[in-house]
Amino acid sequence: MPKPDFNPPDFSHIKIILVEPESPGNIGSVTRAMDNFGFSRLCLVNPCDYKVPHAYWLSRHAEDILEGAETAVSLKVALEGVHIAVATTNRRRFTHNPSFTPKEIAARVLETGKDRTIALVFGRESDGLTNDEVHQCQLISTVPVHPDNMSLNLAQAVIVYLYEIYQHHLEFNPNFDWRLADPRETEQLYMRIERILNMTGFVPRKTMERFILRIRRLFGRTPMEERDVRLLHRIFKQIENSLKKLP
């Protein structure tokens, strides 16, 4: 068993995002779970009216997190400044992106330097995240549960991830910090790839949007560092410049 951690962990670089939460009680329960494991950053995307007595009652000892929660009009806005986002879902997606367990996500989170912001994104209680919202994230994660009942309560799902990250923190001995690329640099890379494909006359079997999603899946399996994106930009820039010189 790991020794008790007497130095409180610093999880200030980790943001919990709830997309359109429908129950104030669930929001209150999430804040209490966050406080249990030392998390403090909560962002609510188009939430229900959550500053109600029931939410405060369930948020016992974590009222400051409830009061200080950020709000955003969309997931895109909530993800501004985030370097790596994890979409949590219990549904199979048509892109067939690799899905990681909460334990695997915990390892990736703690291997990432604290100067990089991480977001754990949770969907609506009724139907989770949309495909578009999942595609805005770099990683997908699913909690392994019994197939007879695969649906977790929102607060239950959140606490699984918080526990795994905290537990991994107790045992973690970092060898290095990843210098993750800024999401804007990665987006520019995807735009450059699409531009080059159009210059070559490439026609995908379905749509260019679906093809670029497959490229995102390829690169999204391992979050790219700054140097990785710079290297790929140099390669594709050379290709792009050569294509421009063709008659």
Image: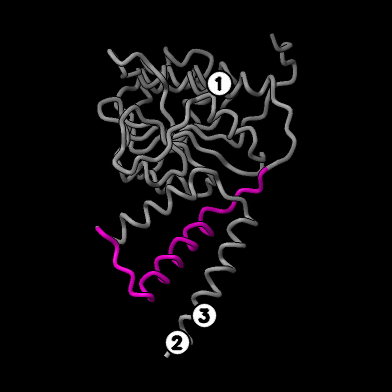
Q: Is residue 199 magenta?
A: yes
- Percent position of residue 105, x then y: 53, 30
Secondary structure under badge 2?
A: loop
Q: Is residue 12 above or below residue 172?
A: below
How many C-alpha atoms fall within 10 Å of the one at disc 2: few (<14), some, or many (≥20)? few
Question: Where, quadrant-wise, is the C terminus in this rendering?
Answer: bottom left
Q: Label 2 sits on what residue type?
A: Leu
- Badge nearest the viewer, 2 or 1: 2
The three-letter amino acid code for the residue at tag 1 is Glu
Residue at image coords 51%, 81%: 242
Report which residue position mark 1 lands on.
Answer: 164
- The numbered mark, 2 or 1, whose residue comes first in the sequence reads 1
Instruction: In the displayed orientation, state which residue is furthest to the bottom.
Output: 247
Instruction: Give the alpha-carbon distance from disc 3 to disc 1, as whole Å.
Output: 47 Å
* Residue denoted by label 3: 241
Task: Specify few, some or many for label 3: CA neighbours under 10 Å numbering under 14, 14-19, or 20 or more.
Answer: few
Q: Is mark 3 on a helix, strand or loop?
A: helix
Q: Magenta span: helix, strand or loop, mainly?
A: helix
Mark whose residue sits in front, 3 or 2: 2
Quarter of the figure with the N terminus = top right
Of residues 102 and 184, the one drawn nearer to the viewer in this rendering = 102
Which residue has dot 2 on it?
246
Residue 58 belongs to magenta span: no
Range of magenta residues: 178-205
